[in-house]
């Protein structure tokens, strides 16, 4: 785990600027059909990241609903996925200057990392060995 001097300030409102070239392959690995993948690729997505003490809340706004990850780094937590309607068990932690959120005991669910580079929030999602990076700008 990183000490507080290594942790970047990820707080704020972030708006999707672009996806990398692997986004469609990633959505295929998630199990989405062609039509749904095309809709998702064009969707407006934003992220609000807030902190309160040690607690981090990541609220990802999508056309289907908000995904809310709210956790204290190092602890397990549960969140309801609006895409599936199912509860998911996850853990979030700092790995140096990268914020990692991973599923607990379910390798079929995606993991996500968030980091800063050149004034962009980079969110890299991985599922079944397929990764994609999404680039967000602070607004």
Image: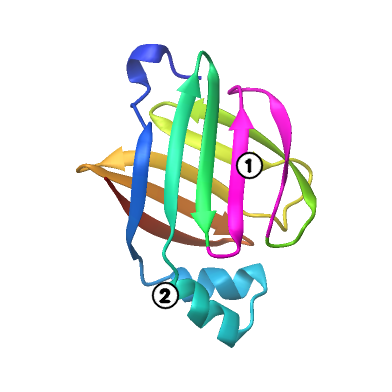
Relative placement, left or right, of 58 versus 115 is right
- Image location (x, y in percent) of residue 3: 42, 13
Of residues 17 and 118, the one nearer the viewer is 17
Q: Residue at x 34, y 27 (%)?
A: 9
In the image, which disc is placed on residue 102?
1
In the image, which disc is placed on residue 114?
none
Q: Is label 2 or label 1 in front?
A: 2
- Image location (x, y in percent) of residue 35: 57, 86
Circle nearer the N terminus (2, 1)? 2
52 over 113 or under it: above or below: above
The kind of secondary structure element at disc 1 is: strand
Q: Residues within 10 Å of mark 1 (few under 14, many from 20)?
A: many
Q: Which residue is mark 2?
A: 42
- Image location (x, y in percent) of residue 108: 72, 58
Number of residue marks: 2
- Image location (x, y in percent) of residue 107: 72, 53
The kind of secondary structure element at disc 2 is: helix
Q: Residue at x 44, y 41 (%)?
A: 48
Q: Which residues are magenta?
A: 63-82
Relative placement, left or right, of 133 versus 73 is left
């Amino acid at each position: 785990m990183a000490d507080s001097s290594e942790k970047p300030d990820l707080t704020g409102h972030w708006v999707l600027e672009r996806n990398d070239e692997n986004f469609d392959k990633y959505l295929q690995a998630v199990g989405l059909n062609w039509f749904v993948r095309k809709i998702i690729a064009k969707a407006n997505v934003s992220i609000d990241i807030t902190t309160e003490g040690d607690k981090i809340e990541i609220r990802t706004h999508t056309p289907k609903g908000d995904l809310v990850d709210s956790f204290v780094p190092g602890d397990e937590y549960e969140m309801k996925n609006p895409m599936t309607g199912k509860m998911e068990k996850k853990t979030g932690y700092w790995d140096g200057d990268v914020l990692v959120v991973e599923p607990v005991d379910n390798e079929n669910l995606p993991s996500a990392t968030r980091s800063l580079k050149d004034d962009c929030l980079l969110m890299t999602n991985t599922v079944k060995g397929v990764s994609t990076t999404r680039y967000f700008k602070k607004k």
